[in-house]
Image (cartoon, helix red, strand yellow):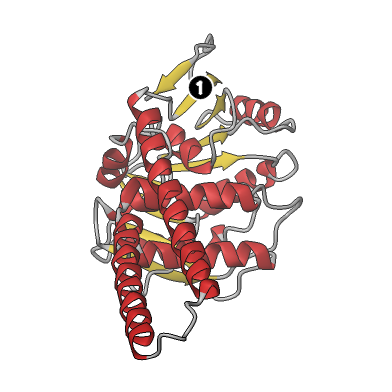
Amino acid sequence: MKYSFVIPCYRSERTIRSVVQELIAEIEKERLTDYEIILVNDCSPDGVWKVIRELAQEYSFLNGINLARNFGQHAALLAGYAKTTGDIIISLDDDGQAPIDELYKLLDELNNDKDVVYAYFDEIKQTGFRRFGTYVATRMSQLLLGAPKDFKGSSFYVAKRFVINEMLRYNNAYPYLLGLVLRTTRKIGCVKTNHRSRLAGTSGYNLKSLFSLWLNGFTAFSVKPLELGALLGVIFAVIGFIIVIVTVVRKLCNPTVAVGWTSIISVILIVGGILLLMLGLIGEYVGRIYICLNKSPQYVVREDTFTADSDPVEERQ
């Protein structure tokens, strides 16, 4: 059985070599001989691509992919998956926080009639902002994507070949990997592991990139936000109808009662805000459909190390 390790790289010039060396040591400890490592540079602003090229020259089983611009972690992983040849695919981060020494816990659970197994952490050694982002992503996957209620995930996971093949069938922009997993299988396992501190640097995610990732999740794989908009419309229509009846009855019972302009304006502002919010959400859906119809590339490969003279520009759409 062959194992493929895929690691997206961004701002990891100082950490990726240590991660690779630890990974190789852990693999060889279990005497696994058939494996490959694929590093994907997501157009990092530092010199990580240079380090990847050096590692590719040192290790025959390691190759790198250099994306033409920053497409995001999920697109970078799909670029790596497209080059894998293994039966089992393992994904992990480039910052050293993934507990590589507990890899075999995930592989053992995969053999327990599971198709995908995620590592999860009781104590997440990240900033409060990143922990909040993880919480929102987990809740969103449960409420909007139908993930199991006990689901706990991370970017450290293992998957069988057929799951990866099905994920690669998704050719549109705005990929969201958990959504692709959930539409493929429900045999998902979660294994508790220890979370490490970062070897160096800080997370490449900010509020904008996290919000964009959440949008990818619920606009590409769920229509529940639109269903929520319809429900809000019904609720406010009923409330408005009740307010009209109450106002008319009060006026008939006591003609001297003044109609409340403040309450009317408040209702108009609330309903108007809901309408604008839902119009913006619909516009987001329509805009993403338009971009997908225009075949916007999921990622563009500037170069890779798989062949000696490799320097083509490869698009996947």
Residue for point 42% across, 25% down: 296
282 lies above or below 241: above
Question: Would residue 31 be seen by someone viewing this image from the given angle?
Answer: no
Position in image of residue 104 (x %, y %) = 44, 61
Element type at mark 1: strand
Residue at the spot x=49%, y=21% of the render?
A: 306
Above or below — where is 257 with respect to 226?
Answer: below
Q: Amino acid at mark 1?
A: Val
Q: Residue furthest front?
A: 256
Horizontal placement of 27 versus 111: left or right?
Answer: right
Q: Residue 166 appears in which quarter of the rendering?
A: top left
In the rendered image, the vertical position of residue 194 relative to residue 93, given as above or below = below
Residues 197 and 185: in front is 185
Count numbered badges in the picture.
1
- Left or right of 164, for residue 44: right
* Quadrant containing the N terminus in the rendered view: top left
Q: How many residues crowd mark 1 within 10 Å: few (<14), some (14–19), many (20+)?
A: many
Q: Give the camera-side residue of 239 and 222.
A: 239
Q: Quadrant of residue 84?
A: top left
Q: Name the residue beneath numbered marker 1.
A: 301
Q: Nearer the viewer, residue 257 or 93?
A: 257
Please tell me which residue lies in front, 254 or 98.
254
Residue 38 location (% of width, % of height)? 50, 35
Q: Does residue 227 appear left or right of residue 83 in this picture?
A: left
The quarter of the rendered structure image containing the C terminus is top left
Q: Which residue is outermost to the bottom?
A: 253
Task: Residue 305: give x, y in percent of width and height.
Answer: 54, 21
Q: Residue shown at 32%/63% (left/top)?
A: 233
